Amino acid sequence: MYLKNFIIQTGKDLLIRFPKKVARSAEYLNELAKFRELSDGRFSIDNKDVYPCLSDKIKFTPFDQHYTYHPAWAARKVAEINPAQHVDISSILSFSAIVSAFVPVKFYDYRPADLNLPGLDSGFADLKQLPFESGSIESLSCMHTIEHIGLGRYGDELDAQGDLKAIAELKRVTKPGGNILFVTPVGKPRIEFNAHRVYSFGQVTNYFSPFTLKEFSLIPDSGGLVQNADPSLVQQQQYGCGCFWFKNEA
């Protein structure tokens, strides 16, 4: 009797706290029973194999605004630049994996990736001391990365100017006429330790001087991608995503 009352009370508590999950669980059990009746015998449907997925029955596919739009933006820029080879420093790995299908890519990270694909090489690099000759890279990207440098989040040393040293290295290794695709959080300048920094538009363009800004696009707090965005929009963002295409016109 105690166990029965416990189960009943627990069910009531769950229904109060998580009504949608309880309802979806009941729906799932009904669907499982119905599907067993519909089964054509080609597959076993054992209880030990059930794998409830209770949160996917939604109208639209959810996605991370920053990490879906900014690699898509950058891939289009690489296609436009059409370099013989592209070098990426510590951006989201899927970007290099996909771009390497149409441009050879060298991916470098403080934590190298053991990923084997045609057209893709991976190696170690410290953004504050890149292992490349000055003026040697035609097409370079570093996206959603600089804001972390020097905060210790990924095992790197604490360095209040780590981001500035890293940007100086990106500029150093870019050849005359070369390109940098740079992405970082933008809005009110601040550090949210130890996750990341957030920059103003002016900070980023000043740090990359004398490189020329060819394009600025923005993923605002409201979502979507604003191409060739008005820089004044940055002031209205809490945690926007700035996409900068710089060119070394020297």
Image (cartoon, grey):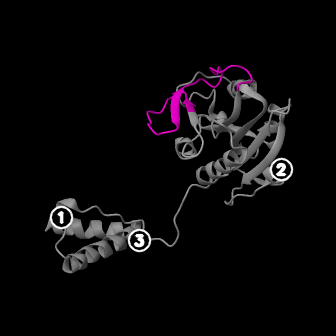
Task: Identify the secondary structure beneath mark 1.
Answer: helix
- Secondary structure, mark 2, is helix
The magenta region covers 107-136
Residue 120 drawn above or below residue 172: below
Packing grade of label 2 (10 A; few <14, some 14-19, many >=20) is some
Residue occupying the far front of the picture: 84
Count of marks, rendered view: 3
Marks 2/1 in contact by CB < 8 Å: the verdict is no
Q: Disc 2 marks which amino acid?
A: Pro
Residue that numbered label 1 is attached to: 47
Tag 3 secondary structure: helix
Quadrant in which the N terminus appears? bottom left
Most common secondary structure along the magenta stretch: loop
Magenta stretch contains residue 197: no
| Residue 129 lies in the magenta-colored region | yes
Q: Residue at x 64, y 48 (%)?
A: 75
Label 2 or label 3, whichever comes before in sequence order: 3
The answer to whether residue 202 is seen in the rendering is no
The picture places residue 12, in percent across and down from the top left corner, at 32, 71
Q: Which residue is mark 3?
A: 20
In the drawing, what numbered circle is on residue 1?
none
Question: Picture coordinates of residue 244 (x, y %)?
Answer: 75, 44
